[in-house]
Image (spheres, helix red, strand yellow):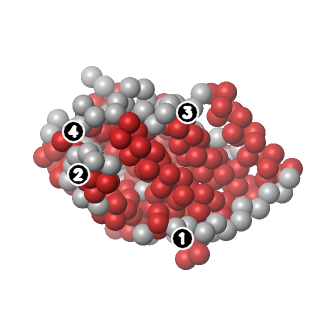
């Protein structure tokens, strides 16, 4: 039994449990957040303590939905589980919450005036992963990211109490850039799950086709294709950097770390000569610590301002 199968057995649609107190629900979310590996910690040393439970609640909602989609025995089961999760979400907003994630989330939603739309949009993307495994164009992939990635950044804006139309523009660029970086980092994992996020038109541009995978992954043309995708993700992350200045001072380091984290993953891909098929790029603990301290130094010692960048084809 995997860790998530254990969670599902205890808190899934077939389980029975006693509704936890709000404090116990937040403790559950914080334990889940601490136990889950991510490229960069959701909760860093510099995140204000009072925000820890709220970030954990949002993360736990996303993590549960992701696991329901990815660890189901079949696409049909995944859709069924996601429908159940959406029922829990609707109940959280309209009635009562019973699942520990939603008991915590209900308090966070109320305190930060978070609407249901970004939370619901994430589920649209997770359902899409069960039914759509290929993308014809880059524009089509960006449309997917509008549901799979951009809502996460918008939720963080609510937690920072800095949501605005102007901030959303930069947040969406960073969120989509991070999603693309993760796609190119997890190329083989996604392929093994039947998913290919590289658009078919990009394969064609480099004289390849999706059907050539995995046999073409060591060819120079495939490395050039990944180089092309990495460059577009880099453009988005660079153009989204001004989002840092929209957040209050106490959150700037954490937000800068997310941006720098995505840029570092892309740098690692370049260091591997754009071969993420043989070895998944990772950022070492030492490098993470360096990024964290650099972000703190730039913001709190140098008073760095993150200037507005001009975005080109990546915004198409």
Residue 54, horizontal then vertical, whole percent: 55, 52
Task: Give me the residue at 63% from left, 47% from top.
Answer: 260
3 and 4 marks in contact (CB < 8 Å):
no
Residue under circle 3?
271
For residue 134, the mark is 2
Figure check: 261 above or below 311: above
Residue under circle 4?
212
Task: Give me the residue at 24% from left, 58% from top.
Answer: 136
Task: Give me the residue at 60% from left, 51% from top.
Answer: 259
Residue 251, horizontal then vertical, whole percent: 69, 55
Question: Which residue of the protein is positioned furthest toward the right in this rendering?
Answer: 301
Quadrant of res 275: top left
3 and 1 marks in contact (CB < 8 Å):
no
Looking at the rendering, in which quadrant would you find the N terminus? top left
Q: Closer to the N terminus: mark 2 or mark 1?
A: 2
Element assignment for label 1: helix
């Amino acid at each position: 039994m995997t860790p998530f199968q254990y969670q599902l057995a205890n808190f899934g649609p077939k389980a029975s449990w006693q509704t936890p107190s709000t404090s116990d629900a937040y403790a559950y979310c914080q334990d889940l957040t601490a136990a889950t590996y991510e490229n960069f910690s959701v909760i860093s040393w510099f995140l204000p303590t009072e925000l820890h439970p709220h970030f954990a609640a949002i993360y736990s909602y996303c993590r549960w939905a992701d696991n329901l989609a990815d660890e189901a025995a079949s696409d049909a089961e995944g859709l069924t589980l996601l429908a159940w999760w959406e029922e829990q979400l609707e109940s959280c907003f309209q009635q009562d919450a019973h699942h520990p994630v939603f008991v915590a989330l209900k308090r966070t939603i109320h305190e930060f005036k978070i609407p249901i739309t970004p939370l619901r949009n994430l589920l649209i993307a997770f359902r899409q992963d069960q039914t759509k495994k290929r993308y014809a164009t880059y524009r089509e992939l960006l449309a997917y990211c509008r549901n799979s990635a951009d809502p996460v950044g918008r939720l963080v804006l609510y937690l920072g109490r800095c949501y605005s139309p102007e901030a959303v523009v930069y947040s969406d660029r960073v969120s989509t850039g991070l999603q693309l970086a993760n796609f190119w980092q997890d190329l083989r994992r996604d392929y093994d799950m039947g998913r290919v996020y590289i658009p078919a038109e990009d394969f064609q541009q480099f004289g390849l086709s999706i059907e050539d995978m995995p046999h073409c992954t060591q060819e120079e043309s495939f490395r050039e294709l990944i180089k092309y995708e990495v460059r577009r993700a880099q453009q988005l992350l660079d153009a989204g950097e001004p989002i840092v200045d929209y957040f209050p001072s106490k959150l700037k380091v954490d937000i800068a770390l997310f941006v720098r984290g995505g840029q570092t993953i892309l740098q690692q891909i370049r260091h591997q000569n754009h071969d993420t098929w043989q070895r998944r790029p990772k950022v070492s603990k030492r490098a993470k610590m360096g990024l964290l301290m650099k972000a703190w130094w730039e913001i709190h010692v140098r008073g760095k301002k993150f200037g507005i960048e001009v975005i080109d084809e990546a915004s198409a």
